Image: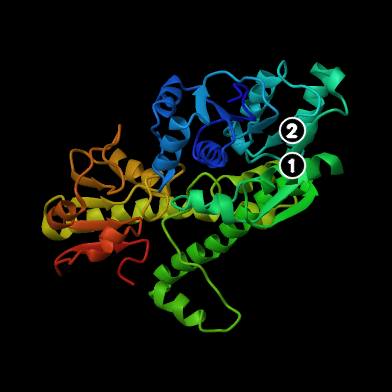
Amino acid sequence: MNNQPEVVMIGLGYIGLPTAALIAQGGVQVHGVDINPSVVDTINAGKTHIVEPSLDKAVATAVEKGFLRASTTAVQANTYLIVVPTPFKAKNEPDISFVEAATRGILPLLKEGDLYIIESTSPVGTTEKMMRLIHEERPDLVGKLFIAYCPERVLPGNVMYELVHNDRVIGGVDEASTEKAIAFYKEHVKGKLHKTNARTAEMCKLVENSSRDVQIAFANELSLICDKADINVWELIELANKHPRVNILQPGCGVGGHCIAVDPYFIVSDYPMESKIIGTAREINNYKSFWCAEKVQTAKLEFQLKEGRKPSIAIMGLAFKPNIDDLRESPAKYIAQKVLQNANNDSYFIVEPNIKSHNVFKLTNYKEAAEKADIIVFLVAHDEFKTLNLSADKIVLDFCGILK
């Protein structure tokens, strides 16, 4: 077996590790890179630090067969995939320093004919910016590398299937790069591969999630209006959706996750004057979380006035969407933190059935919390919560449609 890997995967998080495991499953040697030594050790032991269906088996098999190993440093290969975080600086400005650091890390390793692909969600122009960085540092490689952008578009909880079967948009800095990247993904992806240029591929990723954010904002805005108008928003949306050309989404306690709650800012930051709807949608969805926290505080005060004692409150759900363990950018987590800021030794039960423990919140079993709490606050529509038989004396704040 050749000791030099075919693929180097830089970033072994929620997308990088499943992608590395998928490629390795095909009998291709993959060298994964992560800055966290604990992550590296976990993967080299054939285990995972991420909860994702079938990922543990894929990683264990790939490691056992010698097709996947991890390290904190890159090695020479023929294809390099950059799948690192792109967080924010002040004022929601995207930070591509991790992409740049990953690129600088492989500069000494690059050689003629190599394929360099960014999968990290990035502002428009990032791929070209990295190309210029490479050319400035390695002028000997000008015109000799294939450079492209291909965003992921997977759903947490179904990543391993969607990586294979979802269509992909692939854009190179030139036509040859696009074709080279298409040939690479064709070996591992069964979905259709759509050719474009790097800038369009970068914008496509941002637009997909911004579109979802705008649609959710409409539903969340409706929920605010209906609360004031004393209308059941769930019934209203169900009736409105009987129209053959209307498809309103469901409101919630905000918007979270690593994509929908984040990607619109990449557009708003670069095009603030042109992105009015996108920017306002972000404001609405962020405000919904604040509004939910205020509703909990109001319910608590009303209970105290009526009953003459402080209520016990169950916060049901911390994940950013139902039936997963992912808390990234979670509005439910924000609401829990906001409510607990004013706890004053009040009795609270924090519930998240998809995780065993949390470094901030003490977690309670969902059945126990529902039984003991005076006020039950549904933030995430986990399947477990739908099985509860709540007594009539409970005060229920349903922000996610459990009781609809």
Please indicate, yes or no, whether residue 198 appears anywhere in the rendered image.
no
Q: Residue at x 62, y 59 (%)?
A: 211
The residue furthest front is 1
Provide the secondary structure element on which disc 1 rests.
helix
Q: Residue at x 31, y 60 (%)?
A: 383
Q: Position of residue 183 (x, y in %)?
A: 74, 45
Q: Earlier in the sequence, mark 2 or mark 1?
A: 2
- Image quadrant for the N terminus? top right
Res. 117 image quadrant: top right
In this picture, residue 159 sits left or right of residue 141: left
Marking on residue 181? 1
In this picture, residue 332 sits left or right of residue 14: left
> In the figure, 3 relative to 351: above or below?
above
Q: Nearest the camera: 74 or 402?
A: 74
- Image quadrant for the C terminus? bottom left
Q: Amino acid type of disc 2?
A: Leu
Numbered marks: total? 2
> Are circles 2 and 1 on residues that touch, CB within 8 Å?
yes
> In the figure, 291 relative to 62: above or below?
below
The residue wearing badge 2 is 115
